[in-house]
Image (cartoon, helix red, strand yellow):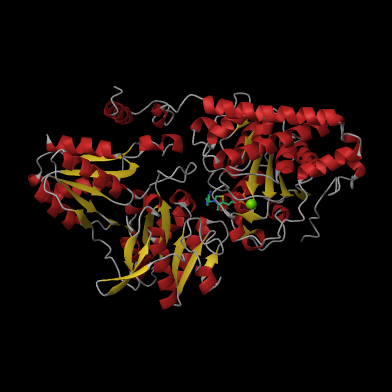
């Protein structure tokens, strides 16, 4: 990470970082400021992680704090539980979200409910990081976007940054949170752009979305890698005279209901975009939030542009699975011309 | 423990017989089969790396260094047996009868690449580590229930032994005494993690003790040791004596995949003394009168043209059918999926 350029903006030191570098920077800071921080995962030591998220961290902090574990996701999460209840602050890296399933039992039956089962006598503040999503021509099973398996799970929070600034801020917020937090990192955005990221500590509040584009005719709601699709669609729609507002949800549980309600009340129309499968997708929860908070303001039924109800296809066909700007524009026109 | 599980070899690094017990079982046909298949998959593997570099293939997992382990074991199978491979075992599956063109397709992100010929029970490669071990136990169980002579083999790496599925597969197989061979290729690394960080045990073979099944440690770069020990394990399985765990000690000569850079984690000189399994077989052939320049040249020409033909077939394969995004998910497509497909095709102007 030698080529990082430092600059001063608004009297605050910032660095030009990619999303993956921002995650690395955040973890470095968390290791520096708190001896209890421990990072566990596969290939995160010398190799620096398969995406280089932990590059250089073992070198600086040693193999006791940045730990290459045996190849076992249940082991990583299970031991993180023990470490967390007993005074450490684990950051567990799951190499790809598609490989988290052996740990699902540990997360579902223990991580998420130890607080409840012990009436807060035991708690497991920990961060689980997992790259997710399709569109990088990865081999099969590496491209899952199964966030609702976790938003459906009471007792754990789920965040999903789309850009470098939010990535570092949400990671630090996740570490400071008294509850376990799953950080879903869009692989497609890991190196897609650089942002000015503050060098020091800051947080992005969990549970708060962000308006990333203001508009008046329709609200687009998305997160992670779908933000860039929403932005492309908004530009195309603008050429047709349609003004789109875009909400980057950033936290998938608990969802920022206010930002959705306020925006939809203003624009009176909504299109939800996610790359996960349609059925049981988070879009359904968002529809019910709009139903509960802004139903009488709606001028058209809500559109959902999502992945299909199929396993994410092998990469030769993945472009046909993922929502495209063209599909989103079609959805936008449908709600606008309803 | 290493003493309890000495590495079995039949030929040494110079291609000389060190265990003469097999001498009269090594005939010209076996030598030529081993050589032909090892050269063939080596040619395939190197071609695949080149294609990936030229952008004609996606990320690829090479197996150079593991040819003896993959070919020796695959040649010990019978036509009716079941094979449960990983993403690195296409050397074994090609040897057993999977098409090379389909295998190239797999690495080009084509689901058609998972499809085995009708007369070969080859499962699609297991990408989630160790998940295939219980499958092999189940397929073997079915053969046992049906009273056939068929058996199953599960291929897996050293890293896979850390997953729960490894334990569960071996435990079930041993409890139900099913005809399965658990064929481990200990290639020293699981991506960047060396075996000594993966486990506290000195060998993988010793893990068999916990399940009360035979465990054997072999030189995985000695194609004869691999062939005869795998055959023995299969004979045992077919005779109703249950599973065997084989640890074939080998070496991943190259990167984990074409997206990996081993210089980040492997000491520079590590593996320098590794004697290539194909070179070892060549030395053996020269030492014991199996070397025939004409046959060797003809075999080289044959394997190269087979691989070239497979590349051609892969590149001329019909383009992906976008309806396959929706096909084969259910026996009968549910109405809501039909609706999703129709609205997508309409969006593309194809309806
Ligand atoms: C459940 C699961 N976790 C993580 C991965 C990512 N991964 C792919 S290969 C690999 C290492 C496997 O090592 P080993 O079992 O020794 O097999 P080898 O690759 O050496 O053939 C890892 C960690 C995966 N595919 N599945
Ligand atoms: Mg290995």
Q: Which quadrant does the C terminus of chain A fall into?
A: top left
- Asked if residue B81 can be seen in this view, the reply is no
Task: Indicate left or right for B25 with A310 as reference.
Answer: right
Depth order, front residue of A42/A11: A11
The x and y percentages for residue A280 are: 31, 43
The x and y percentages for residue A9 are: 27, 70
Name the residue at 27% across, 29% down. B347
- Asked if residue B173 can be seen in this view, the reply is yes
Quarter where residue B42 is shown: top right
Name the residue at 58% across, 54% down. B261
The x and y percentages for residue A158 are: 33, 57
Q: Is residue B289 above or below residue B190?
A: above
Task: Indicate left or right for A321 with B276 as reference.
Answer: left
Depth order, front residue of B143/B49: B49
Depth order, front residue of B294/A188: B294
Task: Indicate left or right for B1 with A45 as reference.
Answer: right
Name the residue at 21% across, 44% down. A235
Name the residue at 60% across, 38% down. B48
Quarter where residue B82 is shown: top right
């Amino acid at each position: 990470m030698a080529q990082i350029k430092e600059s001063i903006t608004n009297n605050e030191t910032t660095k030009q970082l990619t999303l993956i570098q921002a995650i690395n920077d955040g973890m470095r800071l968390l290791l520096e400021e708190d001896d209890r921080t421990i990072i566990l995962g596969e290939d995160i030591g010398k190799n620096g992680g398969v995406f280089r998220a932990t590059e250089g961290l073992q070198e600086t902090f040693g193999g006791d704090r940045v730990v290459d574990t045996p190849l076992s996701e249940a082991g990583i999460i299970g031991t993180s539980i023990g470490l967390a209840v007993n005074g450490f602050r684990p950051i567990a890296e799951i190499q790809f979200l598609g490989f988290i399933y052996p740990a699902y039992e540990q997360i579902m039956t223990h991580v998420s409910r130890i607080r409840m089962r012990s009436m807060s006598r035991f708690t497991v503040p920990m961060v689980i990081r997992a790259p997710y999503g399709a569109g990088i021509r990865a081999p099969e099973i590496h491209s899952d976007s199964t966030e609702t398996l976790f938003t459906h799970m009471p007792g754990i929070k789920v965040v999903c940054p789309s850009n470098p600034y939010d990535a570092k801020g949400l990671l630090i917020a996740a570490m400071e949170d008294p509850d376990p937090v799953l950080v879903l990192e869009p692989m497609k955005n890991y190196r897609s752009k650089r942002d000015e990221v503050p060098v020091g500590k800051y947080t992005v509040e969990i549970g708060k979305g962000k308006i990333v584009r203001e508009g008046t005719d329709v609200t687009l709601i998305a997160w992670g890698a779908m933000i860039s699709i929403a932005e492309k669609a908004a530009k195309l729609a603008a050429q047709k005279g349609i003004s789109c507002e875009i909400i980057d949800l950033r936290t998938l549980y608990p969802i920022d209901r206010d930002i959705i309600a306020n925006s939809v009340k203003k624009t009176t129309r909504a299109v939800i975009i996610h790359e996960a499968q349609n059925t049981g997708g988070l879009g359904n929860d968002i529809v019910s939030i709009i139903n509960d908070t802004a139903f009488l303001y709606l001028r058209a039924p809500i559109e959902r542009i999502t992945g299909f109800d199929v396993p994410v296809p092998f990469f030769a066909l993945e472009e046909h699975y993922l929502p495209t700007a063209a599909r989103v524009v079609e959805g936008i026109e449908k709600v606008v011309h309803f | 423990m290493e003493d309890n599980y000495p590495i079995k070899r039949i030929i040494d690094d110079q291609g000389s017989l060190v265990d003469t017990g097999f001498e009269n079982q090594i005939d010209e046909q076996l030598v030529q089969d081993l050589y032909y298949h090892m050269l063939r998959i080596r040619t395939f593997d190197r071609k695949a790396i080149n294609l990936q570099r030229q952008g004609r293939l996606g990320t690829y997992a090479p197996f150079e260094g593991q040819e003896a382990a993959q070919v020796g074991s695959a040649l010990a199978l019978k036509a009716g047996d079941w094979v449960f491979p990983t993403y690195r075992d296409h050397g074994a599956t090609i040897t057993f009868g999977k098409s090379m063109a389909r295998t190239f397709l797999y690495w080009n992100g084509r689901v058609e690449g998972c499809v085995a010929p009708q007369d070969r029970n080859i499962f699609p490669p297991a990408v989630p580590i160790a998940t295939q071990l219980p499958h092999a136990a189940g397929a073997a169980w079915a053969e046992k229930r049906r009273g056939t002579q068929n058996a199953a083999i599960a291929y897996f790496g050293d890293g896979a032994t850390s997953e729960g599925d490894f334990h569960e597969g071996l435990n079930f197989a041993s409890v139900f005494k099913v005809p399965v061979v658990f064929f481990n290729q200990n290639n020293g690394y699981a991506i960047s993690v060396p075996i000594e960080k993966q486990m506290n045990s000195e060998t993988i073979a010793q893990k068999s003790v916990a399940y009360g099944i035979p465990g054997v440690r072999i030189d995985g770069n000695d194609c004869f040791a691999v062939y005869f020990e795998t055959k023995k394990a299969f004979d045992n399985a077919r005779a109703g004596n249950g599973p065997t765990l084989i640890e074939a000690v080998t070496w991943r000569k190259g990167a984990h995949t074409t997206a990996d850079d081993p210089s980040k984690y492997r000491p520079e000189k590590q593996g320098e003394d590794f004697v290539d399994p194909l070179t070892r077989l060549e030395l053996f052939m020269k030492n014991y009168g199996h070397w025939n320049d004409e046959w060797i040249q003809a075999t080289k020409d044959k394997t190269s043209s087979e691989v070239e033909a497979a590349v051609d077939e892969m590149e001329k394969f019909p383009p992906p059918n976008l309806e396959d995004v929706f096909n084969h998910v259910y026996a009968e497509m549910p109405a809501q999926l039909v609706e999703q497909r129709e609205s997508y095709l309409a969006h593309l102007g194809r309806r």
